[in-house]
Amino acid sequence: MKYGLDQSNGLEFGLYTLGDHLPNPSTGERIPASQRLNEIIELSQLAEQAGIDFFSVGESHQDYFTTQAHSVVLGAIAQATEKIKIASSSTIISTLDPVRVFEDFATIDLISGGRTELIAGRASRTRNFELLGYSLRDYEDLYEEKFDLLRQINEHEVLNWSGNFRAPLRDAHILPRPMNGELPIWRAVGGHPASAMKAGYAGVPMFFAALGGPVSTFKNTVDTFRQAASQGGHDPDELPVSMAGFFYPGETTQEALRESYPFFNEGMKKTNGHGFSKQMFAQGADSRSVMNVGSPQQIIEKILYQHETFGHQRYIAQMDFGGVPFEKLKKNIDLIGEKILPEVKKHTKK
Amino acid sequence: MNIVGLAGSKVGSKTRTAMNYVKQSVERQYPEHTFTLIDLGDYDIEFSDGRNYLDYKGDTGYVAQTIMEADAVIIGTPIFQASIPATLKNIFDLLPQDGLEGKIVSMYATAGSDKHFLIPEQQLKPILGYMKAQVVQTYVFLNDKDFLNKEIINDDVFFRLDRLVEDTMVLTDTYQKIKEAEEAKYDF
């Protein structure tokens, strides 16, 4: 399979952060932005040491976030790590210049020795449009045009291009070039099957964020992606799928729920205006739910069930949302490395 | 508790006149609670463009956030072209899909004709249900003839609006207790 996802070692396991910068709900205290950024970089090193395959950083321009300049953070991570794959999750390509984004990510790729990937999304929150001088009315058109340009730059070192949202390119020589010729570029998909369809038709691998709800519901979107790929003349077996979602292990499932609820609930309230009801959250512990909260054993079962259902090639976990203290993150990385990862790999090897 | 009175129109005076009475009624019967009156005629509100409600600025942001922070919303609506006014529908469009979850919502309608009696039932309640509101099933229907010179002149209307306020407050209070009992079931 293209995109360097070797399944002979089993399902790839990664971590992702949106760089949220929220107070710890139990103390109400918020660490300085400098500390949060440095802890994210350190987290990537710890993830690498624990044998985690992938680490990615997202971009959000809302209040309570700190990795707006995510490519800068990824530059630091490229330098701080040696073998873990690194990526954006996601780059909001709609409000950036694809030429500049490619230059940044090709550079990160060269610094990292060819470990870099790019996940491009449309933004679920939209303050970046106003901040960077774009109209929300062009939400879809901006994304489609700029994502397509990004892919063309990736495929052609010299490019002639014209579109609606950027000055034309004439015999443009876009440098540097990534180490392996091309960067793996993914399309970020949220809840909408229509977005998955576009990825499939275009033959672009899909990064699919599934935050809460039954696994069976999200299966529909994954199927839609693969069907669209076939209809678009692509081989779905050659197009990887990555799943992304909330993750929080505890010694027992009850402990995981008890510890994680305030982080998710207060964090969602602050960033989205709407928390989780306990009723909904408690259902998240069920093995049929897509939310990977529970004891290590419960999480292993969930990930294997999800793998059986979706047939995805990579799972990435968001475990630092809502002001989780760094000590706890370290402990959770240990749980992943010692208990979760070996079992997941053992059962998903091909 | 935070109670919001939402007068849903930029046109006419009857919806606002009735809302003024609702405000008096809440403040008289339940002085310990906060009542915020939002008359859409007093605000300049943008049409929804799909962004998260927290990202609107000015009047739009104020109105959306005030409603989202409410425990109960009492909606007053006129009937325009056999439906709710676009100004009111736009408020719903500004909010998240499940934006009324956990909130008690009650309503009254003012109309020029009794033929419009079922419009809140058939057109407003389905929206509230979709947005997961806890709806006070009984609503008050006011006819033009209940008003004169921006005053309510039908004593029956006062009684019915007082009962609407009481039903809303009793249900809000009860629902808070139900929610607390529900949440207490979980040991996290």
Image (spheres, rainbow, N blue to C red):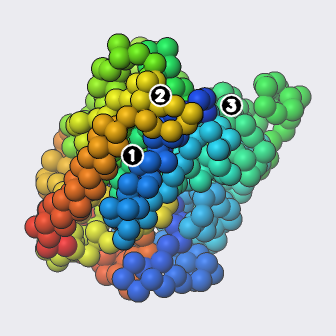
CA gap, disc 2 to disc 1?
Answer: 13 Å
Query: Tag 3's secondary structure?
Result: helix
Which chain does the residue under circle 2 lie in? B
* Residue A231, placed above or below residue A120: above
Q: Amino acid at mark 2?
A: Pro
Q: Residue at x 60, y 59 (%)?
A: A62
Circle 2 residue: B78
Circle 3 residue: A138
Which chain does the residue under circle 1 lie in? B
* Residue B57, placed above or below residue B109: below
Which percent across, then down, holds residue B99? 39, 46
Q: Nearer the viewer, residue A182 or A134?
A: A134
Q: Nearer the viewer, residue B22 or B128?
A: B22
Using the image, tell me which numbered label, if any, was put on residue B74.
1
Q: Amino acid at mark 3?
A: Asp
Q: Amino acid at mark 1?
A: Ile
Q: Residue at x 23, y 61 (%)?
A: B173
Q: Is residue A316 visible?
A: no
Q: Which image quadrant is residue B76 in?
A: top left
Judge if badges 3 and 1 mark residues of a common chain. no
Which percent across, then down, holds residue A309? 20, 39
